[in-house]
Image: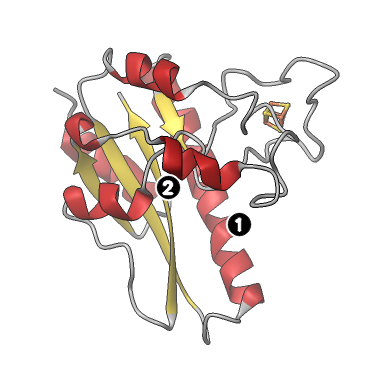
Amino acid sequence: MPDYNKLTNLAKDCGFTNYAPLDIATLHFMEEVRDMCNPGKCDRYDTSWSCPPACASLEEMRRRVLSYDAGLLVQTVGQIEDSYDWDGIMETGTRHKINFGHMYDELRKDNPSVLAMGAGACSLCETCAYPDSPCRYPDRASASMEACGLFVSKVCTDNGLAYNYGRDKIAFTSCFLV
Ligand code: SF4
């Protein structure tokens, strides 16, 4: 089993607001969630190696998680004026991506095979190399939990972590499997 003290301390140091041990058995890769990535529903479809149709299939995700013992859910929660506060939402999302990148880099030092699922499409490059060239950073790129077919709010509640923090807060959620 992973050292959760070490993992949660790292999550805290990386700037996440909340974190919780993730039980692999609660990860269900669902077609109906991935369908939200389809053309007409998300403008990132077919624009990134980290998004459908290029990212790992649900079947591949089901197979991949079998080799992990456990994981950690991480959240960045930000204050917003209301659900129309786009600047506040974007600022929290950017902060989450920075936190996520730091943690992923740190975890890979001891666990080269760590599996990370983020919030939103991979944004490591200003413009994704898809589809003309291979991914520039295949060991650092990550698909979103939703693109992997995970119903994020359910994963959170199944693991004792809130998903909705009220009208004046926004939460971005990601996870790492080790
Ligand atoms: S690392 Fe760059 S090329 Fe690879 S998926 Fe992310 S944005 Fe695209």
- Pointer 1 residue Cβ closer than 8 Å to ligand 1: no
Image position of 113 (left or right of 158):
right
In the image, which disc is placed on residue 14? 2
Secondary element at tag 1: helix
Quadrant of the picture in which ligand 1 is shown? top right
Residue 146 appearing in the image: no
Q: Secondary structure at mark 2?
A: loop
- For image coordinates 53% across by 42% down, the residue present is 35
Q: Which amino acid type is shown beneath numbered disc 1? A: Thr
Q: Viewer-nearest of labels 1 and 2?
A: 1
Q: Residue tagged by mark 1?
A: 94
158 to the left or right of 66: left
Q: Residue 29's x, y, as percent? A: 36, 32
Neighbour tally class for label 2: few under 14, some 14-19, many 20 plus, Cα within 10 Å = some
Residue 112 pos. (x, y %): 43, 14
Q: Nearer the viewer, residue 61 or 116?
A: 61
What residue type is disc 2 on?
A: Cys
Reply above or below: 144 against 133: below
Residue at 75% of width from left, 35% of height from top? 47
Residue 176 in percent (x, y) is at 36, 33
Residue 71 percent location from the top left of the image: 26, 32
